[in-house]
Image (cartoon, helix red, strand yellow):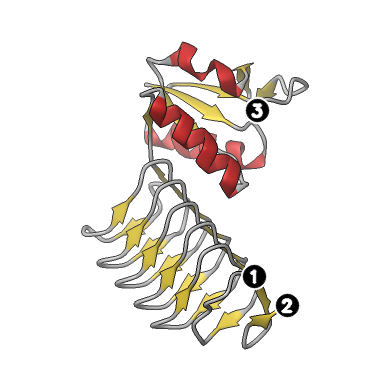
Amino acid sequence: MKLMIIGAVGYGKVVAEIAIRYGYTEIAFLDDNESIKECMGFPVVGRTRDAVKYFDSDFFVAIGNSITRERIINALVESELNIVTLIHPDAVIAADVTIGIGTVVMAGVVINSDSKIGKGCIVNTCVSVDHDDTVDDYVHLAVGSHLAGAVHIGGHTWIGAGAIISNNIDVCANCMIGAGAVVVKNINTAGTYVGVPAKKNG
């Protein structure tokens, strides 16, 4: 099994480690920073534009910026390249959960019944997603964040490390929820929200 990872920095390192556990025996990186020659001991073999040269490989986009991640994933789809979803073997995921292409689920994650995770998402280490949650495309659930039941997270939103979203809450697209924030009311306006309870910053 061959995997090309786009993005040879911190996020790419975690993805490579999961890919090894997933059974990939050949891993290489693409990165647009010409000074980066290797990552996790695996070679950087070209730039993002070179992806089509590796049509016989699977692909994963390990770029933290959600707008850039979406752009690259869309370009790979248009080129009919195979984008995979990576799930760490130590994650616990209910049988009826759906997870979109290009999403990574890291170690210690728990995703409970009837939840839906969109494409291009980052579900980071030790995140919990309770029952009947919907996480839209290109969301980042940072380390140790927790979604209670029946939560909806809009696209391109970042839920900060250790943040908590209470049950039956809707968070709109393009939000930044600060580390350790506790969201107890619906958020209907894009922006940055911090504190306990979370309030709009500025």
Q: Residue at x 57, y 62 (%)?
A: 174
The residue located at (34%, 77%) in the rendering is 150
**Of helix, strand and loop, which one carries label 2?**
loop
Judged from this view, the residue extending furthest toward the left is: 96
Residue 7 image position (x, y, % from top left): 61, 32
User: How many neighbours does mark 1 have within 10 angstroms: few (below 14), some (14-19), or many (20 or more)?
Assistant: some
Where's residue 95, x and y in %? 22, 57
Identify residue type, mark 1. Gly
Upstream in the sequence, badge 1 or badge 3? Answer: 3
Image quadrant in which you'd find residue 192:
bottom right
The residue that disc 3 covers is 39
Instruction: State which quadrant residue 179 falls in.
Output: bottom right
In the rendered view of the protein, which quadrant contains the N terminus?
top left
Q: Secondary structure at mark 3?
A: strand
Front position among marks 3 and 2: 2
Q: Is residue 71 above or below residue 166?
A: above
Is 13 above or below relative to 123? above
Q: Which residue is mark 1?
A: 191
Q: Which residue is mark 2?
A: 201
Q: CA distance from mark 1 to mark 3?
A: 34 Å
Q: Is residue 99 left or right of residue 28?
A: left
Label 2 neighbourhood size at 10 Å, few (<14), some (14-19), many (20+)?
A: few
Q: Position of residue 163 (x, y in %)?
A: 58, 73
**Does 123 sit left or right of 13 as displayed?**
left
| Kind of residue at disc 2 | Asn
Separation of residues labelled 3 and 2 (CA atoms): 37 Å
